[in-house]
Amino acid sequence: MKLSTSFVCEVCGYDSPAFMGKCPECGTWNSLREIKVANQNSQLRSAMQNSAGQANTNPKKLSEIKFDEKDRFGSGFSEMDGVLGGGIVPGSVTLLAGDPGIGKSTLLLQLALNISKADNPVLYISGEESEQQIKLRANRLNHSRNNNLLLLSISNTDAIVDVIANVSPKLVVIDSIQTMESENLTGLSGSIGQVRYAAMEFIKIAKSQNIPIILVGHVTKEGMVAGPMVLSHMVDCLLFLEGEKFTRVRILRGLKNRFGPVDEVGVFSMTGAGMSEIKNPELLFLSQTKDGAAGSVLTATLEGTRAFLVEIQALAVFSKLPMPRRVASGVDSRRLELLIAVLQKHARLPIDAMDIYVNVAGGLKLSDPAADLGICLAIFSSLKNIPVNKIVGIAEVGLLGELRPVADFGKRAKEAKKLGFTNILGTDKFKTLNEVIQRLSK
Ligand code: TYD
Ligand code: MG
């Protein structure tokens, strides 16, 4: 194979033929690493070749191309099928990313057990655990004895490609992409070159044999080194498994999907016998706050097509520091800074000398701007000691302190009413943040 040299950014995957001190794509200093890659053109060419090894040069009419929705097959988890857009597409490559220990291996082992049948072998390849360890894990999970799950503990990329071609399974799970290694290039497993090479090889075999492959990718807290972000433009689907390790709730989120909608979520719970689906997650993100507690408010967030009622908690206390703390968990910290500034300027809340902590109950990460009003009201409630914990705030807050309407307000309000919360504050009743705060102060 022809190898050429390339310099790849560890953070964002930017590819450059020459070394640079700063990545022009993401602006990180000193993040470019030299790697040996198989010539990009020849890689792409072989990915598009048919099984006989000939390049496919005949354009086809759209109507002649066969893709049947029926080709998708279920994962055995309806929560996961929803995220994938209706099931697993043959020949697709999916990357399941998440923090170590969050439950990726458990979820995929269950999925493999669900799918494997006598005439549908599933190949589960682990570069992290021995076959005995996987067996031990499988014993904890409820599964039928007449499965046809094939296990292999190996981390050699090239050997794995041969095994996949020989076994021709219904599905392949590779746990994890960071442990894969090839002698065809230098660098330890987990280095950006090895990770990219392995992903490229697996994509090739998936496309040419029409076998779906799910790759596991670990995310590190410090910016996902050589991990999912580098691969996200190569794979067909990128899924994230999130949650806090000390709580049971796990959220599966689709961030990229070439075969379906993005931003759908599936909700699972980690139990003693593996992951179990939570089909009615309504009450999951509400903590049992006692009546009259200040600093807690509800909001309704939209995740894909589903609305969830979520509790936001805030704590505002006098700071001893010259630069008061602003600690956000579950919401973007820059968004929090911005909302604090708006509260100060437009609602005239004296919070410039306060430490402010904001937390989203249940481990959900809110990126929906509709949570803005909720965050502001939680801070207000904690500061003034005014309980608002039966109130649902649903609106985006602008820099001028104005409230902006959000998508699908009706759906969110319906979810709140279904759970018995009828005091819903939104742009239908209020135009500015200040008006809401005036009303609640009375
Ligand atoms: P794991 O799937 O190994 O995480 P990852 O592959 O993402 O690193 O999950 C590890 C955690 O899950 C571990 O702390 C034990 C816990 N666990 C359960 O709570 N129940 C179970 O049935 C299993 C198999 C694991
Ligand atoms: Mg694992």
Image (cartoon, rainbow, N blue to C red):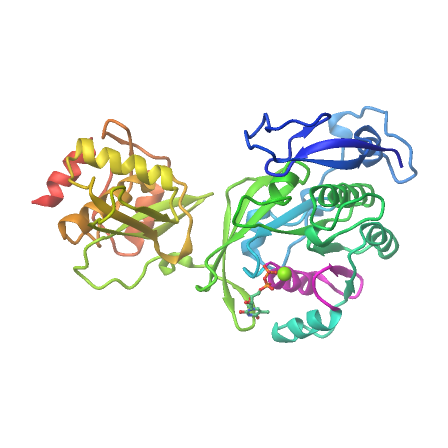
Instruction: Answer with left or right where residue 424 lies relative to residue 114.
Output: left
User: Residue 223's image quarter?
Assistant: top right
Q: Which residues are magenta?
A: 104-130
At 10% from the left edge and 44% from the top edge, which residue is drawn? 441
Res 427 visible? no
Looking at the image, is 62 positioned above or below residue 214?
above
Residue 252: x and y in percent read 53, 52
Looking at the image, is 170 positioned above or below residue 403?
below
At 55% from the left edge and 30% from the top edge, which residue is drawn? 26
Question: Is residue 7 one of those drawn in magenta?
Answer: no
Query: In the rendered image, which quarter contains the N terminus?
Result: top right
Res 307 visible? yes
At 29% from the left edge and 46% from the top edge, which residue is drawn? 325
Q: Give the total of numbered labels.
A: 0
Looking at the image, is 17 positioned above or below residue 257?
above
Instruction: Answer with left or right where residue 196 lies relative to residue 21.
Output: right
Query: In the rendered image, which quarter contains the C terminus?
Result: top left
Q: Nearer the viewer, residue 140 or 300?
A: 140
At 57% from the left edge and 53% from the top edge, which residue is drawn? 80
Q: Nearer the viewer, residue 139 or 134?
A: 134
Residue 180: x and y in percent read 75, 52
Q: Nearer the viewer, residue 407 or 47?
A: 47
Whereabouts is ligand 2, in terms of quadrant?
A: bottom right
Instruction: Answer with left or right where residue 146 lies relative to residue 398.
Output: right
Q: Nearer the viewer, residue 125 or 224?
A: 224
Residue 211: x and y in percent read 77, 48
Residue 20: x and y in percent read 65, 26
Question: Is residue 129 one of those drawn in magenta?
Answer: yes
